[in-house]
Image (tube, rainbow, N blue to C red):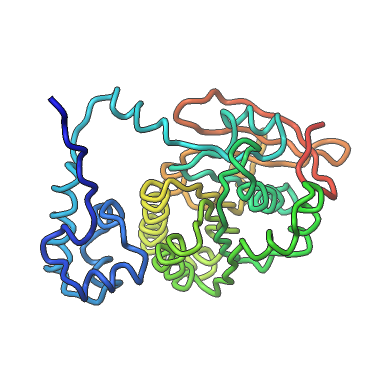
């Protein structure tokens, strides 16, 4: 008996989504029912400019159509075959991360200034544009700069090292300067529109905590800061899942005076960021102008470290 192929679900199949709402959802990048299913009613209501009750009905319909619920582990394993990885251009770093920086995950690099966090971001912003058989994802980049550290000149150097068309590489990187935490959150809320339009496969935020640290000062603001940061990180994870893309974030550090022995360096963001980052790496300066990257936390990889160097043409093995 011949089975008819299963019809692909579109947003037009969802009850409550008429022509006008469907058009509005597509304009803001919500053309995939999965993107709607993993959004909160308040978030969808604000973005699509509809009532929260109507947003909740649309989200529930999307979840029912997609049959979101429990599933067996073998199905999850099968779905993870769609996970792809961006090569850093350094075999040591790639091996540390299980083959590269993977999609459907948040990878965090924290360390002191000059430890190489931004440089790795520049490298993968170029590498993601390579074909898949060369360690890329054949995609483009959203780069959110919170510390005024984005330098197109550095992108050109790395692109030249890979013998790529520098003008094309630069055009494939969309950069936004975030001026405060609210602006940073807004840029991610508006990201689906850009992801759909520009074939985005990598989101970089350099750095994730800079504005939250500046905007929420003192213990009295700590709870509010962590709540907003937590929501922001969940939005990033939803984008990574819905669009099968890489989220790479850098993070600032502080020195803990209560640690008398060992390294007193500790990342900003507390338990909220520690739990939400899928892969967490600590970068520090090594001997003779090298950098050391230690994998601190991962759901499936052992804690280990590797050494690399930053050259004029990018990240390289020692």
> What residue is drawn where x is 55% and y is 52%?
139
Q: Nearer the viewer, residue 246 or 183?
A: 246
Residue farthest along the front direction in this orientation: 2
Q: Is residue 287 left or right of residue 185?
A: right
Residue 111 visible in image: no
Q: Is 305 placed above or below 255 here?
A: above
Q: Is residue 24 left or right of residue 131?
A: left
Q: Position of residue 97 (x, y in %)?
A: 58, 32
Number of numbered labels in the structure image: 0
> What residue is drawn where x is 42% and y is 30%?
81
Q: Position of residue 69 (x, y in %)?
A: 18, 38
Q: Nearer the viewer, residue 259 or 229?
A: 229
Q: Position of residue 238 (x, y in %)?
A: 36, 51
Q: Quadrant of the N terminus?
A: top left
> What residue is drawn where x is 77% and y is 46%?
162
Q: Nearer the viewer, residue 101 or 306?
A: 101
Q: Is 54 placed above or below 86 here?
A: below
Q: Quadrant of residue 135?
A: top right
């Amino acid at each position: 008996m011949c089975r008819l192929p299963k019809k692909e679900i579109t947003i037009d199949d969802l009850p409550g989504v008429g022509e006008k709402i469907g058009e509005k959802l597509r304009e803001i990048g919500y053309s995939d029912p999965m993107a709607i299913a993993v959004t909160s009613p308040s978030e969808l209501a604000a973005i699509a400019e509809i009532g929260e009750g109507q947003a909740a009905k649309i989200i529930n319909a999307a979840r029912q159509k997609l049959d979101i619920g429990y599933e067996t582990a073998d199905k999850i394993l099968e779905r993870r075959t769609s996970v792809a990885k961006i090569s850093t251009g350094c075999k040591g770093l790639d091996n540390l991360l299980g083959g590269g920086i993977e999609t459907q995950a948040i990878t965090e690099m924290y360390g002191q200034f000059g430890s190489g966090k931004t440089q790795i971001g520049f490298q993968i912003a170029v590498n993601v544009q390579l074909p898949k058989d060369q360690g890329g994802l054949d995609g483009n980049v959203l780069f959110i700069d919170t510390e005024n550290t984005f330098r197109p000149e550095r992108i050109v150097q790395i692109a030249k090292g890979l013998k790529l068309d520098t003008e094309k590489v630069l055009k494939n990187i969309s950069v936004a300067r975030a001026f405060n935490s609210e602006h940073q959150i807004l840029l991610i809320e508006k990201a689906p529109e850009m992801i759909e339009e520009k074939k985005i496969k990598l989101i970089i935020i350099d750095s994730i905590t800079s504005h939250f640290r500046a905007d929420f000062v003192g213990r009295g603001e700590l709870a509010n800061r962590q709540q907003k940061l937590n929501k922001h990180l969940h939005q990033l994870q939803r984008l990574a899942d819905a669009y099968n893309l890489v989220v790479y974030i850098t993070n600032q550090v502080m020195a803990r005076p209560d640690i008398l022995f060992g390294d007193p360096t500790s990342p900003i963001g507390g338990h909220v960021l520690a739990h939400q980052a899928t892969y967490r790496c600590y970068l520090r300066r090594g001997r003779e102008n090298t950098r050391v990257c230690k994998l601190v936390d991962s759901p499936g990889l052992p804690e280990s470290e590797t050494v690399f160097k930053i050259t004029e043409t990018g990240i390289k093995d020692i």
